[in-house]
Image: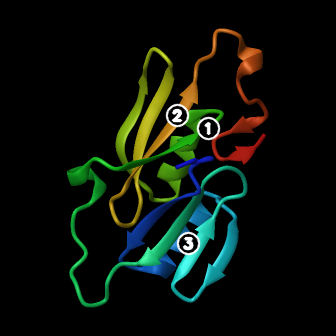
Amino acid sequence: MNIKRVGNVILAVKDLDKSIKFYNEIIGLPIKQQRRAWVDLGSKGALLSLHPASLTATHFGTSIENGIAIGFIVGDVKSAVEELRSKGVKIYRDVVDREAGKNAIILDPDDYMISLFEPDFKDKDQQTGGYQGFTPV
């Protein structure tokens, strides 16, 4: 086996339209490709793919119970959390300082955990600049 990279992270969601609105309009991930029951979001690196959970089986087991989290790197985690809080997004854990940087966790419409991470590089030139929260400054 010769794996080149992670292609996508796939989430089974209860309400595809609600999840598209969350990830595209609130988080700001661009829609790369959309089909009837499958949506790919993102522009670089791994894609976030959404598809409806089974119509015949109950959707259960949020990431809080099973430990799955999606991680996004942001330029300013505090402003990202403030922006998302103002849009009604559930904050699971507010900003905390870690050795490697600042981190917060929010919840999507299906209670999947999303980790927001602001790296704390000693050499600030290494850190991706020009971003505050989810949008360019």
**Which circle's residue, 3 or 1, is located before the other in the chain?**
3
In the rendered view, how is the structure colored?
Answer: rainbow
Q: State the SS at label 2.
A: strand
**Which circle's residue, 1 or 2, is located before the other in the chain?**
1
Q: Position of residue 54 (x, y in %)?
A: 32, 83
Residue 132 falls in which quadrant of the image? top right
The reply to whether dot 1 and dot 2 touch (C-beta < 8 Å) is yes
Question: Considering the image in quadrants, where does the C terminus appear?
Answer: top right
Outermost residue, top side: 122
Specify the label residue 54 is tagged with: none
Q: State the SS at label 3.
A: helix
Q: Name the residue tied to disc 2.
A: 117
Q: Name the residue tied to disc 3.
A: 21
**Residue appearing at x 67%, y 49% in the figure:** 45
Q: Is residue 56 above or below residue 80?
A: below
Q: Position of residue 129 (x, y in %)?
A: 76, 30
In whole angstroms, how far apart are the C-alphas of marks 1 and 2?
A: 6 Å
Image position of 77 (left or right of 106):
right
Outermost residue, front side: 1
Q: Name the residue tied to disc 1.
A: 74
Q: Position of residue 58 (x, y in %)?
A: 21, 80
Q: State the SS at label 1.
A: loop
In whole angstroms, how far apart are the C-alphas of marks 3 and 1?
A: 20 Å
The amino acid type found where label 3 is placed reads Lys
**Residue appearing at x 39%, y 66% in the figure:** 109
The amino acid type found where label 2 is placed reads Phe
Q: Position of residue 56 (x, y in %)?
A: 25, 90
Q: Is residue 128 above or below residue 2?
A: above
Which of 92/52 is in front?
52
